[in-house]
C-alpha cells in the first residue's frame, strides 16, 4: 500500500484540506455518510486498518491504523421536531453544545456524561456514556430512537426512526452501544427529548467526613425524594487533582445535589430532603446558578482528569450497603485515599494516591475482595475497549465480525 | 425418529414434564393470533440446567425448539411453526428475590406479570411494564417481545427495566449478561436479547429494575365527538411540557364494546375518549390537570371529568383492559395491529384507518397508546368467511403501508414473529435485514431456536 497515493485519492473525494498525514496515518474529515462510504471503499481496496474518532486523532489504539475517520465536521443538529419531542443530529456534534442548543429552545437531553465538553454524541453511544443522573435518566443509549451508520464495507445503513416504540426485528440501534467503533461509523442519531424542567436547583452540603456524607446519601435514597444528581466527594480527591475548587465549598465530606421539576414541587422536594436528613446536616446551601454551574463543571473536570481515569476503581454495591462499602475501603486504605461516590446509584470511585505500583495493586485487590464480600462488583468504565475483561469475548467478537467481516476496524 | 429424543427429554425433565399426547400438542399449538400448528413434543422445564440440557439434545438431533410462556403473543412468535419441541417455561414461575430498598427484583421467566405486581403491592414500589395481557403473560415473554403497555411515554418499555439476564444459548451454554448492577459498558447483549423474540436464546432468570410508586396520581376522562380532536389534544398536552403517565384513546366502536361488557356509563355516542393520567409529587398535579383540561376544551372536548375515587379509576381501567376481549361479542374473530407513527402523524393515520374500514367494509376500531403514537387498530370479522378474511389481510397490509409512509413502524410492541415477516422488508433495508440474519446465524448456526420467525434464514 502506498500512503501518499492513497492520500491523493482520498483528497479527490474529500478535498485537500480534509485529508491530513500524521506520521504513518492518514486522518480524514468527511462531511457526510456518502463521503465516509467512499473512504471505506478505498480503505478496503488498500487493505488499510481504520479507526474512528470524534475529534482529533491522538493515537492510543491497540493497533496502529493507517486511516482514521474523524466525525468532527459532522457537528450540527439537522432537525428539531418539537411536535414529536425529538431531534436528529449528526454524530460528531459535541455533547455539551448539543445540550445547550436544545435547552435554549426549551428542550432537554438529560444524559450528562462528565466528558461532555470534549466528547461527541457518536462517541457517547459507542462507549455507552452516562452521567451523574444515570439513576434517574439512564444512559445516552436509552434516548436513541434511530441511527444512520456506515458499515466497514461502505454500505450506508439506517435503522429506527421517529418512533418512541419500535420492535420491528432486533434492536440494531442499541447494538451500537458499547461497540467502540468496531461496527463502522455512526453518522446520524435520532434522540427522544424531554421538556426542559421548569426549575433546576443545586444544593451543597458539608460533612465532617465522607462517611457521614455517604450515610446521608442512604437516608436520601430511602426518604421519598431521589435527587436527580447526588455526588459525594472527599477533600483528599479535590486536593490531589483540582486546585480551582473554591475554598468555601471544601470540606472533608461534600455532597453536591441537583433537583429538577415543576415550580410547585421543588420547594416540596427540598422540604422532604431536609426532613429526611434530620440533624445530620446543619446547613442546606442552595447554590446560585453561577455557583452551581461552576461546581458541576469542576465535578466533571475531576471525573475526567487523566490521573483519575487511570487510577480510579469503579465499584457498585446495593444502595443499602453504601456505608459499609465506604468503611471497607477505609479499612484497607494506605497512602492517601480520594473518594467520589455517585450516591443515587451507589457507585464508588476510590483512588489511592502516593503508593508505588505494587502497593497500589495490593490495596486495590483488598478493596476488590471487600466489595465482593458485600456482594458488590468491580466494574470498568467504558472509555477503552478491553476484550480481556469482557465475559462474552468470543460471542462479542463473532457478532462484530458480522458487521466487519474483513476485520478492518481497530479499537 | 423422535422416540429416542423423547426418552432423553424424559430423562432430563422427568416423564410428567414431557408430553406427546394429541390433546397436549393441540394445547401448545396456538397463541393469540389465528394460525395454529402442532409441536411434536411438549416439554416443561423447571430449572436452568434442564433448559440447557434440552437445548443440547435438540441441538444434537437438530430438533426445532419454540420457547413459550403464556402464549399471549400477538405476532405468532410462540407458535411451533416448525414442529419439534414446544418448550414451556411456565413452571419456572418463582419470584426469587424482591429487594425494594435496592430497587431490584429477580424472577424466573414464567412469573406472570400480574403476580409480580401483586407481590409488590403495598411495598411502595412497582415494576413499570404493564402490557394489557398482564394478568396472564409472563415476564419471560415480556422480555422476548420487549413488551410495552399504556405507560411507555413516561416510563419506557420492558427494555428499560432489565438489568441482567441469565440466558441459555441454542447450544445449551449458559451465560449471565449484566446483573444486579447492570454491568460493564461492553456491547450491550442484554438489550440485544430484549425483543429478540426467542430466536437467540432462552431467558431463564432476569434481574429487573423497580421504581418507587409516585406519591400522587390523577386520572381524567375526556370525551370527544371526533377521533381527530382527541388525537390533537394529545400532542397539545405534551407540547405544554407535560408528560402524562398514560394517554389512552378508544374510538366509538371500542367504547361500545367496552360498555357492553363493563357497564360503567361510558358515552356510547362519543367519537373518542381519552383516559389521561398524570403522576408525581402531590403539589404539582393540580396545575397539570388544569392545563390538560384547557387543552381538551380547546380541542372541542364535550366533557371532561376527574376521577374522584379509586373505584372510578378502577372502572375506567377495567374498561380499557377488557376491551380487546370484549370485541368477541361483536364478531368471532379479530385482527389486532400494532403500528406506531410519530405522534404528530397520529391524527392522519386515524383518519386513514376510518377510510380503510369503509373501503374494505370491515368494522375497525382504534385503540391507542396515543402519547407514544402506538395504535392498535382492531378489525372485527369471522374467520370462517374467506372473503372477509381476505379483506382483513388487505386492510392489515394497507395499515402497515400507511404507517411506514408516515414515518412509522409496523410494530411498536408486539414484534414481528410470523404475522409481520412479509412486511419487514418494507421497513428495513436489505443491509439491515442481512445484519439481523447474520446475528441469528452467528448465535444459532443450525437454526433450531424458534426457526422461521422474524427473518428468513437461508
Image: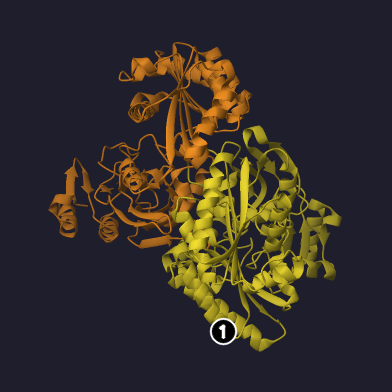
Chain colours: A orange, B yellow
The subunit letter for the residue under badge 1 reads: B
* Residue B315 found in image quarter: bottom right
Tell me residue B378's x, y (percent). 63, 73
Instruction: Name the residue at 63% across, 53% down.
Output: B219
Please state if B142 lies on the left or on the right of A296 as rendered: right
Q: With respect to residue B33, does A280 lie above or below?
A: above
Q: Quadrant of the N terminus of chain B?
A: bottom right
- Viewer can see residue B1: no
Please state if A114 lies on the left or on the right of B292 as rendered: left
- Viewer can see residue B309: yes
Q: With respect to residue B368, does A10 lie above or below?
A: above
Q: Judging from the image, what secondary structure is the residue with disc 1 in? A: helix
Query: Label 1 belongs to which residue?
Result: B358
Viewer-proximal residue, A399 or B424? B424
Tell me residue A273's x, y (percent). 55, 27
Viewer-proximal residue, B67 or B287? B287
> Counting other residues with Cα less than 10 Å from the Cα at mark 1, is it few (<14), some (14-19), or many (20 or more)?
few
Please state if A176 lies on the left or on the right of B386 as rendered: left
Instruction: Name the residue at 49% across, 12% down.
Output: A208
Amino acid at each position: 500500500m502506498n500512503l501518499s497515493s492513497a492520500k491523493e485519492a482520498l483528497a479527490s473525494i474529500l478535498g485537500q484540506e480534509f485529508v491530513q498525514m500524521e506520521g504513518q496515518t492518514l486522518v480524514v474529515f468527511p462531511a457526510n455518510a456518502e463521503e465516509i462510504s467512499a473512504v471505506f471503499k478505498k480503505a478496503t481496496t488498500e487493505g488499510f486498518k481504520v479507526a474512528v474518532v470524534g475529534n482529533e486523532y491522538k493515537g492510543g489504539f491497540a493497533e496502529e491504523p493507517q486511516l482514521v475517520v474523524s466525525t468532527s465536521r459532522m457537528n450540527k443538529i439537522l432537525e428539531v421536531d418539537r411536535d414529536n419531542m425529538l431531534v436528529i443530529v449528526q454524530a460528531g456534534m459535541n455533547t455539551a453544545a448539543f445540550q445547550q442548543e436544545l435547552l435554549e429552545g426549551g428542550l432537554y437531553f438529560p444524559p450528562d456524561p462528565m466528558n461532555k465538553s470534549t466528547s461527541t454524541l457518536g462517541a457517547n453511544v459507542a462507549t455507552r456514556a452516562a452521567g451523574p443522573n444515570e439513576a434517574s435518566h439512564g444512559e445516552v443509549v436509552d434516548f436513541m430512537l434511530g441511527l444512520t451508520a456506515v458499515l466497514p464495507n461502505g454500505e450506508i445503513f439506517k435503522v429506527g426512526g421517529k418512533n418512541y416504540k419500535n420492535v420491528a426485528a432486533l434492536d440494531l440501534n442499541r447494538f451500537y452501544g458499547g461497540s467502540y467503533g468496531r461496527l463502522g461509523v455512526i453518522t446520524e442519531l435520532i434522540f427522544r427529548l424531554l421538556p426542559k424542567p421548569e426549575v433546576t436547583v443545586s444544593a451543597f452540603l458539608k460533612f465532617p467526613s465522607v462517611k457521614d456524607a455517604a450515610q446521608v446519601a442512604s437516608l436520601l435514597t430511602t426518604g421519598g425524594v431521589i435527587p436527580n444528581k447526588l455526588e459525594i466527594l472527599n477533600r483528599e480527591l479535590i486536593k490531589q487533582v483540582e486546585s480551582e475548587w473554591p475554598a468555601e465549598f471544601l470540606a472533608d465530606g461534600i455532597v453536591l445535589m441537583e433537583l429538577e421539576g415543576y415550580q410547585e414541587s421543588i420547594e416540596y422536594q427540598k422540604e422532604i430532603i431536609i426532613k429526611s436528613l434530620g440533624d445530620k446536616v446543619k446547613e442546606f446551601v442552595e447554590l446560585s446558578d453561577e455557583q452551581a454551574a461552576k461546581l458541576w463543571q469542576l465535578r466533571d473536570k475531576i471525573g475526567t482528569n487523566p490521573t483519575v481515569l487511570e487510577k480510579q476503581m469503579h465499584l457498585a454495591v446495593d444502595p443499602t450497603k453504601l456505608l459499609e462499602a465506604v468503611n471497607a475501603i477505609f479499612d484497607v486504605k494506605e497512602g492517601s485515599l480520594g473518594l467520589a461516590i455517585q450516591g443515587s446509584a451507589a457507585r464508588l470511585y476510590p483512588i489511592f494516591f502516593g503508593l508505588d505500583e505494587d502497593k497500589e495493586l495490593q490495596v486495590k485487590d483488598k478493596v476488590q475482595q471487600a466489595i465482593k464480600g458485600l456482594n458488590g462488583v468491580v466494574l470498568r468504565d467504558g472509555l477503552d475497549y478491553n476484550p480481556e475483561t469482557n465475559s462474552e469475548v468470543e460471542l462479542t467478537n463473532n457478532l462484530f465480525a458480522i458487521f466487519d467481516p474483513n476485520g478492518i476496524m481497530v479499537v | 425418529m423422535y422416540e429416542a429424543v423423547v426418552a432423553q427429554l424424559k430423562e432430563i425433565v422427568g416423564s410428567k414434564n414431557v408430553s406427546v399426547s394429541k390433546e397436549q400438542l393441540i394445547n401448545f399449538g396456538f397463541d393469540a393470533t389465528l394460525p395454529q400448528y402442532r409441536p411434536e413434543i411438549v416439554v416443561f422445564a423447571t430449572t436452568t440446567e434442564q433448559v440447557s440440557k434440552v437445548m443440547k439434545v435438540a441441538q444434537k438431533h437438530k430438533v426445532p425448539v419454540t420457547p413459550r410462556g403464556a402464549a399471549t403473543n400477538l405476532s405468532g412468535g410462540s407458535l411451533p411453526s416448525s414442529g419439534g419441541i414446544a418448550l414451556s417455561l411456565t413452571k419456572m414461575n418463582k419470584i426469587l428475590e424482591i429487594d425494594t430498598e435496592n430497587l431490584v427484583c429477580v424472577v424466573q421467566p414464567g412469573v406472570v406479570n400480574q403476580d409480580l405486581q401483586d407481590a409488590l403491592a403495598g411495598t411502595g414500589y412497582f415494576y413499570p411494564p404493564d402490557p394489557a395481557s398482564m394478568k396472564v403473560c409472563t415476564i419471560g415473554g415480556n422480555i422476548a417481545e420487549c413488551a410495552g403497555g399504556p405507560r411507555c411515554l413516561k416510563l419506557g418499555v420492558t427494555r428499560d427495566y432489565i438489568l441482567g439476564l441469565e440466558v441459555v444459548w441454542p447450544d445449551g451454554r449458559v451465560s449471565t449478561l449484566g446483573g444486579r448492577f447492570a454491568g460493564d459498558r461492553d456491547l450491550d447483549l442484554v438489550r440485544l436479547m430484549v425483543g429478540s423474540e426467542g430466536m437467540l436464546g432462552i431467558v431463564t432468570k432476569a434481574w429487573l429494575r423497580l421504581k418507587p410508586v409516585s406519591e400522587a396520581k390523577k386520572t381524567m376522562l375526556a370525551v370527544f365527538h371526533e377521533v381527530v380532536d382527541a388525537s390533537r389534544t394529545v400532542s397539545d398536552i405534551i407540547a405544554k411540557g407535560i408528560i402524562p403517565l398514560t394517554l389512552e384513546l378508544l374510538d366509538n366502536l371500542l367504547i361500545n364494546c367496552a360498555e357492553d361488557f363493563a357497564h360503567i356509563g361510558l358515552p356510547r355516542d362519543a367519537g373518542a375518549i381519552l383516559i389521561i393520567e398524570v403522576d408525581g409529587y402531590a403539589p404539582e398535579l393540580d396545575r397539570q390537570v388544569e392545563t390538560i383540561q384547557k387543552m381538551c376544551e380547546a380541542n372541542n372536548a364535550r366533557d371532561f371529568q376527574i376521577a374522584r375515587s379509586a373505584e372510578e379509576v378502577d372502572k375506567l381501567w377495567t374498561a380499557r383492559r377488557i376491551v380487546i376481549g370484549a370485541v368477541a361479542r361483536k364478531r368471532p374473530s379479530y385482527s389486532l395491529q400494532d403500528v406506531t407513527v410519530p405522534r404528530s402523524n397520529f391524527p392522519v393515520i386515524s383518519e386513514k384507518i376510518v377510510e380503510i374500514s369503509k373501503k374494505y367494509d370491515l368494522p375497525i376500531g382504534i385503540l391507542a397508546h396515543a402519547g407514544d403514537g402506538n395504535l392498535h387498530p382492531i378489525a372485527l370479522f369471522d374467520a370462517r368467511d374467506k372473503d372477509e378474511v381476505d379483506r382483513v389481510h388487505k386492510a392489515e397490509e394497507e395499515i402497515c403501508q400507511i404507517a411506514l409512509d408516515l414515518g412509522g413502524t409496523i410494530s411498536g410492541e408486539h414484534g414481528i414473529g410470523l404475522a409481520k415477516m412479509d412486511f419487514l422488508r418494507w421497513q428495513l433495508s436489505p443491509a439491515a435485514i442481512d445484519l439481523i440474519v447474520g446475528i441469528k446465524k452467528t448465535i444459532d448456526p443450525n437454526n433450531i431456536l424458534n426457526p422461521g420467525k422474524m427473518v428468513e434464514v437461508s
